[in-house]
Amino acid sequence: MTLIDLDQAATTATRRAVLEAMWPWLTGEHGNPSSTHALGRRAADGLADARARIAAIAGVRPAQVVLTSGGTESDNLAVIGLTLAAIAAGRDRHVVVSAIEHEAVLASTDFLARWHGVEVTRVPVDAEGVLDAEALRAALRPGTALVSVQAANNEVGTLQPLDAVVDAARAVGARVHTDAVQYAGWYPLSELPPVDAVTISGHKLGAPKGVGALLLPTNAPVEPVIHGGGQERERRSGTENVAGAVGLARALELAEDDRLAHPLAELEAQRDAFIAAVLVGVPGARLTGHPARRLPCHASFVVPGIGGEPLLIALDDRGVIASSGSACAAGRDEPSPVLLAMGHDPDSARTAIRFTWGVSTTQESLDTAARELAESAASLRGLG
């Protein structure tokens, strides 16, 4: 059976060109970039080149690229590190986030609240997952240390009004972080509003798992969350993953090539056709997230009366790979906190299903997936 992978927001396959770029740094050029001998110097040069290429795609200076183990670590460094540094500089122990942030952000704020007495304000979203800008402005105060709002939500695909977020935060002097893990690759990172910190993750873009970056101004004080030898300009200690950095750079370049080769309007039209097919073929299905201001290859639904997990199992048996939302929450029985924050009742939130794909996914595959979903839903309803 040929699988149709429609869970690419969870992870993507490592691209062959990425592996080929990494291979020398995993074999012969295996030096530690902190070593002063020839192998180490070549590794340091390779790392510097990768950092410069990442910076070029992101529209920042190489010194602003802090290499990490992935999105979770980058979120932790941004939220915890920027907040603690701001508090040390005299800011209030106050952080503002949206109610539907990724677990890496919300868990980081929970840590700050438990261990550092930080007050955390979660700003509500509307029924389509869009941040309430008025509520954000009301939540902020002159001493607020940090605002963290996703560029695009991983579960429902909604794009957030980052311009309004930045304007509100700047009015009170707060730093701004955005988790752009899902946003990167689909839109130019260089065109993000002037936030202070941006999280990206390699395995969402065709690089291996275990590498990511935090884009951070060189003058932004940040308290490290990993301590040791002071690598990454003393912002993230640990022997640098040269091969991973090279892979991340190549993956970003390939994603940029794909973005330019596949007009956004075409991808959105393909997405909207798939959404329409699902809504027609599955009685009672409802789209979650904003119908237009959403990621181009992202479609998410609730199907009241049918549990999300049984539906995923039925699709899996038919060769269609999907998810019930965040991969980080897979296997849990609790309803999605994102959907609850958007006003869904717990029973509805437990019926969530998400389809995410890439530019190489064919229209035929999407048509097949919509048909298999309709048949699976009908079969499960027939079973009661």
Image: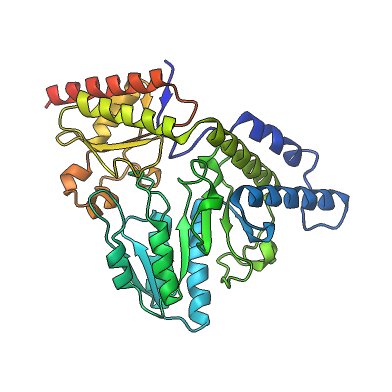
Provide residue 127's location: percent of width, then percent of height: 22, 50
Provide residue 153's location: percent of width, then percent of height: 37, 48
User: Could you tell me how many numbered marks the image carries?
Assistant: 0
Please say whether residue 120 is visible from this viewpoint: yes
Task: Indicate how the structure is coloured in the image.
Answer: rainbow
Q: Is residue 322 left or right of residue 209?
A: left
Q: Residue at x 27, y 52 (%)?
A: 337
Is 149 placed above or below 29 here? Answer: below
In this view, the residue in front, 77 or 309, is: 77
Farthest residue, direction top? 1
Farthest residue, direction bottom? 90
Q: Quarter-wise, where is residue 368 in the image?
A: top left
Please say whether residue 111 is visible from this viewpoint: no
Quarter of the image for the N terminus: give it: top left
Q: Residue at x 84, y 48 (%)?
A: 39
Q: Residue at x 14, y 34 (%)?
A: 305
Is 274 placed above or below 195 here? Answer: above
Q: Is residue 325 left or right of residue 264?
A: left
Is 371 placed above or below 130 here? Answer: above
Provide residue 103's location: percent of width, then percent of height: 39, 55
Provide residue 286's location: percent of width, then percent of height: 21, 37
Quarter of the image for the C terminus: give it: top left
Q: Quarter-wise, where is residue 234 in the image?
A: bottom right
Q: Is residue 167 left or right of residue 99?
A: right
